[in-house]
């Protein structure tokens, strides 16, 4: 009898309330996302349980999975990196996301981030002819700053053969993920239009960057897929004080007026809640703010996004898409942070998981 009464109460009172809250949440934050490194095979089970137990109840609806070369590519097996997922393992992730209405978006870093510290990425390791700056050698011990201005290598966007290779990878990874969007990275591109590049030298860096965005976007559009990128290269860093990491010092920022309006921008700021989403939205671009590991900053960014949407004109309102939290460690580290924070109260307060919880909690509070 008690079970019948509870079922009636749930159907009549509780379920409509939950639906109303979800509807308001969707109205305020259409995108409630997480960008995270793809899990390794040995931690896949833990990752899937974590998503179902911790992220689904918090109403996550978008997941960007940073795969890069960690997949058993059939089109270019020579580019498979050291911890690849199999097709069967990817399909397990796809099935979980479909079941829980999570939009799953794979990422491969294009243009920039083709090296890291002392390690050359697979693309330039296998195809050194694609290197924008072959004269800059990867050091045995990396330090920043350095005389070469080396942060990460880039491929040359004008090399005649580079897109045949990278688009094979993009198509294959989008197909296996059954994705309607692809994240191309394209952040922190310091090497572009190098003076010693026989193809790029003397060219406008903004036009080079915008041209690469258009080229990737147009290729994805052939299969009705959307392009997502990080937004830092489209912001001016010197006059605004945003700096060379979260914005551009090499004049690529003018590309914001040269790229298609259907490119989705992930606007990351980690130490301060800078209001740059307004710049992208007023340019006609769809934008999500992307926080990281500071719960105080994250909370303000969530509040700002809600206010932007509520205060915007009807022409601009839907350009404010929501929030996509970021993590920059192996996926299993976030899983461990989450479960440790449950067990140890002294562990709470700061960090990637604390920031992610702050994002969800603030969204829920604003949707009440």
Image: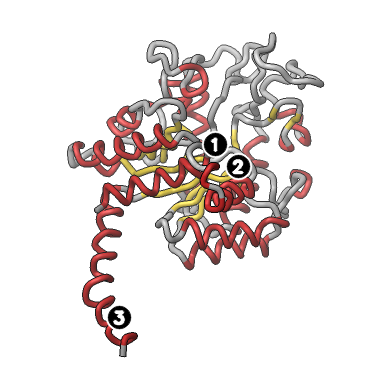
In the picture of the structure, the residue carrying the numbered disc 3 is: 6
- Relative height, residue 187 to residue 330 (above, below): above
Q: Residue at x 58, y 46 (%)?
A: 337
Q: Most extreme residue toward the right, as rendered?
A: 140
Q: Position of residue 328 (x, y in %)?
A: 58, 38
State the image quarter where residue 132 is shown.
top right
Q: Residue furthest top?
A: 147
Residue at the image position 53 percent from the left and 58 percent from the top: 51
Name the N-terminal-most of marks 1 and 2: 2
SS at badge 1: strand
Marks counted in the figure total 3
Q: Left or right: where does residue 186 sit relative to residue 361?
A: right
Q: Nearer the viewer, residue 223 or 299?
A: 299
Q: Residues at badges 3 and 1 in contact (C-beta under 8 Å)?
A: no
As measured in the structure, the alpha-carbon distance from the residue carrying label 1 to the one carrying label 2 is: 7 Å
Q: Would you name the residue on which mark 1 appears?
A: 185
Tell me if residue 243 comes above or below residue 314 in the rendering.
above
Q: Percent from the top left, x then y, of residue 252? A: 47, 20
x and y percentages locating residue 340 in the rendered image? 58, 49
Foreground: disc 2 or disc 3: 3
- Quadrant for residue 85, please give it: bottom right
What residue is rendered at 77% in x and 45% in y? 82
Determine whether, in the image, residue 131 is placed left or right of residue 20: right
Quick one: label 2 or label 3, which is nearer the N terminus? 3
Of residues 353 and 210, which is closer to you in this image?
A: 353
Asked if residue 65 can be seen in this view, the reply is: no
């Amino acid at each position: 009898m008690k079970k019948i009464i509870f079922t009636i109460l749930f159907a009549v009172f509780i379920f409509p309330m939950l639906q109303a809250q979800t509807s308001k949440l969707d109205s305020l934050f259409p995108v409630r996302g997480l960008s995270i490194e793809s899990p390794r095979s040995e931690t896949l089970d833990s990752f899937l349980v974590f998503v179902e137990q911790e992220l689904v109840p918090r109403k996550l609806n978008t997941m960007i999975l940073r795969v890069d070369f960690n997949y058993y590519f059939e089109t270019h097996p020579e580019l498979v990196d050291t911890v690849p997922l199999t097709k069967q393992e990817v399909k397990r992730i796809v099935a979980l996301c479909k079941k829980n209405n999570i939009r799953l978006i794979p990422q491969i870093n294009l243009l920039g981030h083709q090296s890291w510290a002392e390690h050359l990425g697979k693309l330039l390791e296998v195809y050194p002819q694609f290197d924008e700056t072959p004269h800059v050698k990867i050091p045995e011990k990396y330090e920043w700053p350095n005389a070469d201005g080396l942060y990460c290598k880039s491929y040359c966007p004008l090399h005649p053969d580079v897109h045949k290779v990278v688009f094979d990878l993009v198509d294959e990874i989008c197909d296996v993920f059954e994705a309607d969007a692809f994240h191309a990275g394209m952040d922190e591109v310091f090497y572009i239009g190098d003076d010693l590049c026989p193809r790029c030298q003397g060219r406008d860096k903004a036009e080079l960057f915008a041209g690469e965005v258009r080229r990737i976007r147009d290729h994805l559009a052939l299969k009705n897929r959307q392009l997502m990128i990080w937004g830092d290269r489209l912001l001016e860093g010197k006059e605004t004080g945003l700096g060379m990491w979260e914005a551009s010092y090499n004049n690529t920022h003018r590309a914001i007026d040269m790229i298609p309006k259907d490119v989705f921008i992930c606007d990351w700021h980690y130490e301060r809640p800078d209001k740059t989403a307004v710049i992208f939205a007023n340019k006609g671009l769809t934008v999500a703010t992307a926080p990281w590991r500071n719960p105080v900053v994250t909370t303000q960014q969530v509040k700002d996004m809600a206010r932007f949407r509520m205060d915007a004109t009807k022409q601009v309102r839907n350009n404010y898409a929501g929030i996509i939290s970021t993590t920059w460690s192996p996926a299993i580290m976030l899983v461990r942070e989450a479960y440790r924070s449950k067990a140890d109260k002294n562990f709470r307060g700061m960090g990637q998981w604390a920031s992610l919880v702050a994002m969800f909690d603030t969204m829920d509070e604003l949707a009440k």
